[in-house]
Amino acid sequence: MNVRELQDEILKLKKEKNICILAHAYQRQDILDIADYVGDSFGLSQKAALVDNKIVIMCGVRFMAETVKILSPQKQVFLANPIAGCPMADQMDVDLISQLKESFKDYTVVAYINTTSELKTVCDVCVTSSSAVKIIKNIDNDKILFIPDCNLGDWIKKQVPDKEIKLVHGGCPTHLRISTRDVDKMRKAYPNAKLLVHPECLPEVVECADFVGSTTEIMSFAENGDNKEYIIGTENSIVEHLQFKCPDKIFVPLSKDCVCHNMQATTLADVYRCVSGIGGEEIVMSDELIASSRKCIDEMLRLGK
C-alpha cells in the first residue's frame, strides 16, 4: 500500500472500532493527517477524557500515553510504538526525588508533565510548559523544587523572581542540541525572521528569542503572526507542519539536529498495526498508581483555574 491507501485503511478501521487517535505535534505529517486530535501532551490527554471512544491510541511517547490512562482509567489506552520513550522522563526516579524531599522538607515539589507516572506519585504539583509560570505563581509556598528540566526551570525562575526555585539537573537532549552558534548562523541567513523557541532550550538560546512558548504556542504565534519568515527552535517536525498550514510563509529550523528520535520512531505502519489489533502496547496501570499519580495533576488543574 502507498501512504494514501494506508491512511484510508486506518481511517476505516478506527471508525469501525470506534477508536480515537491522538498525535503529538512532533509526529510525522502523515500521522497528523489521520489523527482525531493533534497538540501538546496534556491537552491531548484532556481531549481523550472527553470523547466517547473506549479505545485511545497515543502517537507520541510513553509518559504521554500514561497521562491519558491516568485521566481516562476506564478506557483502553495504547502506545502506537512501544519503544517510543522520553529520555528526560526517565532521568529521575522515585528514590532520588524521595531523598531530595527529605533534604528540602519545606519545599513544594513541582514536576514537569514530562515525567513517568511513578515519579508523579512523589510530587506535589504538575505543570506543562504553557501553564508552569501561572501554576507556580499560584502556589502558596515560596520555596519550589522543580524537576526535571533545569532549562525550563531557569526560564520559570526569571518569570517568577519572587519565588525561591531550586533546580535539579536534567533536561531534554533534543533541545540541548541547539546552541547560540545556531542562532547567529540563522539570524544572519534570515535577518527579517522572528525566532521562536521552546523553553526547554538552553537559557542563552532562550534569551535570543523573539517569542518563547510551548509547541502549540509556537505554532499559533507563527500561524497568526504578520511576519513572513520564522526560525523555529523546537523539534524540526514543527517546521514541516507549519509549511503545510501556511505555505505563503517561510519556516526554517534553528538547528537541523533538533530531531527527537523517540518521537520519530512511530510510523504510519505502526498506527495501522495498532488499529488492526496486532501492534502497539496497551498501557496497564494499577488503580493505586493511577490514583497516586493523579494527585499532582489534579492540583495543577486546581491552581490553574
Image: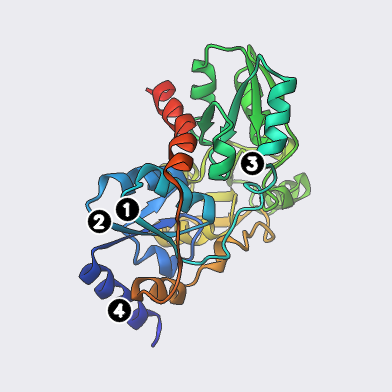
Could one spot residue 221 in this view of the protein? yes
Q: Residue at x 75, y 21 (%)?
A: 103
Q: Spatial distance from mark 4 to mark 3, Cα to Cα?
A: 37 Å
Q: Spatial distance from mark 1 to mark 4, Cα to Cα?
A: 23 Å
Badge nearest the viewer, 1 or 3: 1
Q: Residue at x 45, y 77 (%)?
A: 269
Query: Which residue has dot 3 on it?
Result: 200
For the N terminus, give its image quadrant. Answer: bottom left
Q: Are marks 1 and 4 in contact (CB under 8 Å)?
A: no
Q: Amino acid at mark 1?
A: Lys
How many residues crowd mark 2 within 10 Å: few (<14), some (14–19), many (20+)?
Answer: some
Query: Which residue has dot 1 on it?
Result: 75
Between residue 187 and residue 49, name the one nearer to us.
49
| Mark 1 or 3, nearer chain start | 1
Q: Spatial distance from mark 1 to mark 3, Cα to Cα?
A: 31 Å
Q: Amino acid at mark 4?
A: Glu
Q: Is residue 97 above or below residue 290?
A: above
Residue 179 at x, y = what percent?
Answer: 75, 47
| Mark 2 or 3, nearer chain start | 2
How many residues crowd mark 3 within 10 Å: few (<14), some (14–19), many (20+)?
Answer: many
Between residue 255 and residue 19, name the one nearer to us.
19
How many residues crowd mark 4 within 10 Å: few (<14), some (14–19), many (20+)?
Answer: some
Q: Spatial distance from mark 2 to mark 3, Cα to Cα?
A: 33 Å
Element on which disc 3 rests: loop
Query: Which residue has dot 2 on it?
Result: 53
Badge nearest the viewer, 2 or 3: 2
User: Dividing the picture into quarters, in which one does residue 216 lie?
Assistant: top left
| Mark 4 or 2, nearer chain start | 4
Badge nearest the viewer, 2 or 1: 1
Q: Are marks 2 and 1 in contact (CB under 8 Å)?
A: yes
